[in-house]
Amino acid sequence: MARLSARDVLHAVLDEGTFVSWDTEPVQPDLGQEYAAQLARARERSGVDEAVLTGEGLLDGRRVAVAAGEFSFLAGSIGSAASERITRAFERATAEGLPMLASPSSGGTRMQEGTPAFVQMVKIGQAVAAHRRAGLPYLVYLRDPTTGGVLASWGSLGHLSIAEPGALIGFLGPRVREIIHGEPFPEGVQVAENLAHRGVIDGVVPLPGLRRVAMDALRVLTGEQEPVGEHGTEPDLDELAAPGRRGRPCRRPDGRTARGCASCCGTRPRCSSRCGGRTPASRT
C-alpha cells in the first residue's frame, strides 16, 4: 500500500483550490556538509522543502489551518526547521481564531540533529496547548507511520484523534523495541484498528471519509453547547432542594451534611431530628 502524501490529505479534505501555504524557506542548522547534502537529496526526491507543510484553506466554506507531515522527506522526521514551521502555524491559527487540522506521518524527531530536535517537541506541545486554551478545535488524522516524539507531542493532543486504516502508531518504534528487548511487539499491537478498539484513539477512517468526519467534528466543537428543543416541564426547584430526596444528602441548617447522612433513599430510616432527612442505614 502506497503511503499517503501531505498533498493527498490536503486535496481530500479541503475545498478544491482553496489551500494557501504559510511556509517560508526553512532555515536549517549548520551541521556540516553531509547533513546539508541529505537535505538537498530529500528535497529533490520528495518535491517539498521540509517534512511538514502548513497553511490554510476552506473546509465546507469554513476557514481552517492545516499542518500535514510528508514522510518522503527524511522519513517525515522533525528537526528544528520543521518544528519551527509547526509552532508558527499553531501560533498563527490561535491568533486568527482558526481550527487546526493536522495529519502527521513521521518516524519521530530527526536523529541527525540530536537532542535539540527532541526538545523542540516541547515547544510544539506548548503551542498546541495555547491553541486549545483559546477554545479552538484541534483535529488529528494519524497516518502510517506516526511514532516517537511526533506522536508524543502534536500527534496525540487533538480533541479528536483518528487514524488511517492499518497505520503503524506508537511511541516506541518496532525496530527500537526489538533492539532494546530482543523481541518484537506482539503482532497487531501498534496497528490503528487495535488502538481504536482499546480507546487509545477515537476511530479509524479511510481518506475518502476524512472530509465528512472533519466537517461533522467541527460542527459539533464550534456549535452551541446548550441543548435545544423541547425538554419537558421545568423542574420543581423546591422538590430538588428538599432534604431526604433520593440521591441528595441531608443538610444541617448551617449548610453542612448531617452526621452519618449520605445520598438518601426513601426506604432507609430517618436521620436525627437535626436534619429530618434519612441515613444510609441504622448501625448496630
Image (spheres, rainbow, N blue to C red):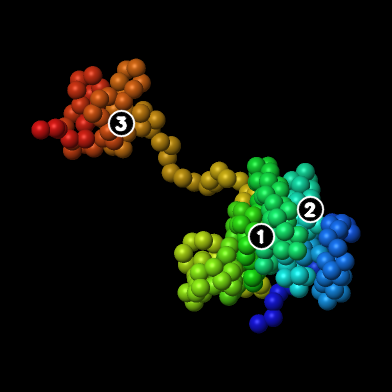
Tell which of 98 and 181 is nearer to you.
181
In the visual, does 144 lie left or right of 64?
left
**Viewport quadrant of the C terminus:** top left
Which corner quadrant of the image does residue 282 belong to?
A: top left
Three-letter amino acid code at disc 2?
Answer: Glu
**Marks 1,2: beta carbons within 8 A:** no
**Marks 2,3: beta carbons within 8 A:** no
**Which residue bears the numbered disc 3?**
249
In the visual, does 150 lie left or right of 83?
left
Tell which of 176 and 85 is nearer to you.
176
Three-letter amino acid code at disc 1?
Answer: Val
Three-letter amino acid code at disc 3?
Answer: Pro
Figure disc tally: 3
- Measured from the top left, where is residue 12 in percent x and y? 73, 70
**Marks 1,3: beta carbons within 8 A:** no
In the image, is residue 85 above or below residue 277? below
Calculate the distance from the C-alpha at mark 2 to the C-alpha at mark 3: 54 Å
- Measured from the top left, where is residue 97 in percent x and y? 74, 46
Q: Residue at x 25, y 22 (%)?
A: 275
Calculate the distance from the C-alpha at mark 1 to the C-alpha at mark 3: 48 Å
**Which residue bears the numbered disc 1?**
150
The mark that comes first in sequence, 1 or 3, is 1
Q: Residue at x 81, y 64 (%)?
A: 50
**Which residue bears the numbered disc 2?**
84
Secondary structure found at label 1? helix
